[in-house]
Image (cartoon, rainbow, N blue to C red):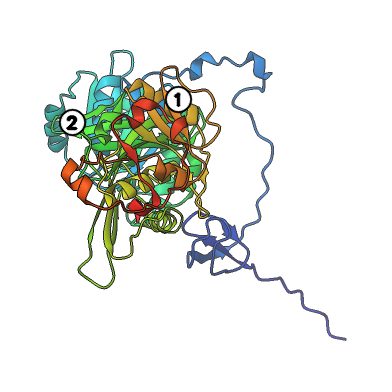
Amino acid sequence: MAARSKTTAKPRPAYRCTECGNQLPKWVGRCPECNAWGTVEEYGAVPIRTTAAGPVSAPARPIAQVDGQVATARSTGVPELDRVLGGGLVPGAVVLLAGEPGVGKSTLLLDVAAKAASAQHRTLYVTGEESAGQVRLRADRINALSEHLYLAAESDLGAVLGHIEAVNPGLLILDSVQTIASAELDGAPGGPAQVREVANALIRASKERGMATLLVGHVTKDGQIAGPRLLEHLVDVVLSFEGDRHARLRLIRGVKNRYGATDEVGCFELHDEGIAGLADPSGLFLTRRDKPVPGTCLTVTLEGKRPLVAEVQALMVDSQIPSPRRTTSGLESPRIAMILAVVERHGGVKLGKQDIYTATVGGVKLSEPSADLAVALAVASSSSDTPLPSNLVAIGEVGLAGEVRRVTGVQRRLTEAHRLGFTHALVPPDPGKVPAGMKVVEVADIGEALRAIPGRRRPAKPRSEAASAPPTPRRAAAPAPVAAYPEELMEGWEPLDSDELR
């Protein structure tokens, strides 16, 4: 009888996602962790490892005995950035700041580096994209020079760690994480493995030294942070730097924050001398005029917890082509198309043969529904060539049935509008407590809102014409709650009826 031969099972191959590092037992077309397609690759057999208990770095203690003072946030010297961070930079925290090329990331962080540097807390600025001379020229332009600010141009991870050992900074700024590579790993800088290794090394150094770290990250064409998604999970704070390169306004939004809220927004203004924080940015979104003009309406939007007064403009002209144009700037095109349909169907404003252009002022992007009512009023104002009062703001979401819905933070929006000198507002029903001295008109649907538009003052006809002309019957307009409106809002004007809007 032949003896049986002993066989050993071959090690099964393992697979890993190159985007997020998720390990899988078999190949799949789409990674279940990051939902990326075509990123799962075979990298070898799964090793069987067992880890034995080892020595601990520090014994576990009751949480009440842990000293929380070592994690107290320190100001960066830029109040708008401190607002988004939750008070400042926490020692040992790692912050990832991502944004499109040319938005002003390097300019902002160089200004932060100079203002945060002190004798007790040195700042090390490492650039992997520019030379030290180029950074010095920018520092001269924005006046970001400090004797406690150290500058190094490196692209090797070992050299960066060597500079950290030599300078012993309290703040490290790395511009950018995609340009640094480790000599111990294969692959070009910016690859998933390189970015993961660089991030892990810098996070480990930050936690051991209590050193705050600011990492600059690139973004892809669709606005996502470049590199493995694991990078966003490793860092403590993720900030998004937004703004149109042709506008002065820049916004920093918190995407992830382990030390504070993520609903704060920092506003900055980019100018020739650098970048400056805006404690009151509403002036950028308004146009100062001597008298009101048709097609403009003001609204109050919320950027995080921050109310901002913005201006919406609309222009209507006779179309010269069979398919009229619908062009938007700073507003969402699908939502504008919906509002135009509601204004035409439930408001009686004929828009079919008109080219319609809608835009915001100052480069601000309005995406929340609270600007719907302002857009509808601006379109109706442009259609009837009737200017709205300059002291009026409109807040509310418009539904497909023509109703005006409530939005969040109405009281906060009205308070901001009243602080800037606006005295009247059109809002959805039940707005809550109204600021003293501000008169609010509640509108339930788009019809009431359009009837609240004051009409142009009609010139008085000469007596001879009035006597000779036969009286023409006029269809009675639908009753409008004009009597409930503030007299100052309607003084010198007449409400538009449905015939005039048509």
Where is residue 142, by image quadrant?
top left
Is the Cβ of the residue at disc 1 closer than 8 Å to that at disc 2?
no
Residue 497 pos. (x, y %): 38, 48
Q: Looking at the picture, tell me which residue is in the foreground, 50 or 95.
A: 95
Quarter of the image where the C terminus is located: bottom left
Residue type of the residue flagged with mark 2: Gly
Where is residue 340, by image quadrant?
bottom left
Which SS class for mark 1? loop
Q: Residue at x 32, y 56 (%)?
A: 188
Which SS class for mark 2? strand
Q: Residues within 10 Å of mark 1 (few under 14, many from 20)?
A: some
Q: Is residue 204 visible?
A: no
**Of marks 1 and 2, which one's residue comes earlier in the chain?**
1
- State the residue lying farthest toward the bottom: 1
Q: Residue at x 57, y 69 (%)?
A: 28
Residue 168 is left or right of residue 48, and the answer is left
Residue 486 pos. (x, y %): 40, 27
Q: Looking at the picture, tell me which residue is in the foreground, 13 or 337.
A: 337
Residue type of the residue flagged with mark 1: Gly
- Please give the residue where the numbered disc 1 appears in the rendered image: 86
- Please give the residue where the numbered disc 2 appears in the rendered image: 274
- State the residue lying farthest toward the front: 468
- State the residue lying farthest toward the right: 1
Quarter of the image where the N terminus is located: bottom right
Residue 180 is left or right of residue 83, and the answer is left
Residue 500 higher or lower than 152, as above or below: below
Q: Residues within 10 Å of mark 2 (few under 14, many from 20)?
A: some
Q: Looking at the picture, tell me which residue is in the foreground, 305 or 21.
A: 305
Q: Residue at x 51, y 14 (%)?
A: 69
Residue 261 higher or lower than 400, as above or below: above
Q: Which mark is residue 117?
A: none
Give the total number of marks visible in the rendering: 2
